[in-house]
Image (cartoon, grey):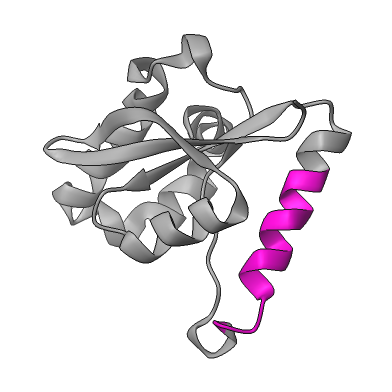
Amino acid sequence: MGSIYRTMLRKPVALGLSLLPSIVKPARIKRILDILRYGRNEPTAQLPRAELLSLAVAPDARGSGVAERLYHRLATYFEEAGEGAFKITVGDALAPAHRFYTRMGAAPAGRVEVHQGQGSILYVHTLVE
């Protein structure tokens, strides 16, 4: 996420306008700063460089296989790009996401705290054995 935020910082006016609703909410700014720090604090030595940051499906499309198709397409993209694996960080409280990523073939690889006091599990999906 850090590289995404750094890219956004290159367009400060557009960033400022999109963040305007959040600026009045300090808790959101703190969460953004947590995410910026996250990449520096994770145990990166054994983790893949490629990362799935988020996967979201509209409520009316859930259960239709859309998430599975998106996930498999991303895995194919990473494999074609020469990545041997990719990582996923999932907050402890997101039980459906844990079940989904496990079902897709990702395996728990460690723990991290992105937001203070809120644990997350790091998953790794290996593409090339």
> Seen from this angle, which residue lies furthest right?
80
Residue sitting at x 81%, y 46%: 76
Question: Where residue 73 appears, x then y in whole percent?
Answer: 78, 55
Per the rendered image, the range of residues in magenta is 62-76
Placement of 53 over or under 19, stated as above or below:
above
Side (left or right) of 81 relative to 116? right
> Seen from this angle, which residue lies furthest left?
117
Question: Where residue 84 appears, x then y in whole percent?
Answer: 74, 26
Q: Main secondary structure of the magenta part?
A: helix
Placement of 28 over or under 68, stated as above or below:
above
Tell me, yes or no, whether the highlighted magenta stretch contains residue 7: no
Q: Nearer the viewer, residue 118 or 65?
A: 65
Residue sitting at x 74%, y 55%: 72
Picture mark count: 0
Q: Nearer the viewer, residue 14 or 50?
A: 50
Q: Nearer the viewer, residue 61 or 126?
A: 126
Side (left or right) of 119 relative to 101? left
Residue sitting at x 47%, y 28%: 2
Question: Where residue 94 appears, x then y in whole percent?
Answer: 31, 59
Residue sitting at x 61%, y 22%: 49
Tell me, yes or no, whether the highlighted magenta stretch contains residue 63: yes
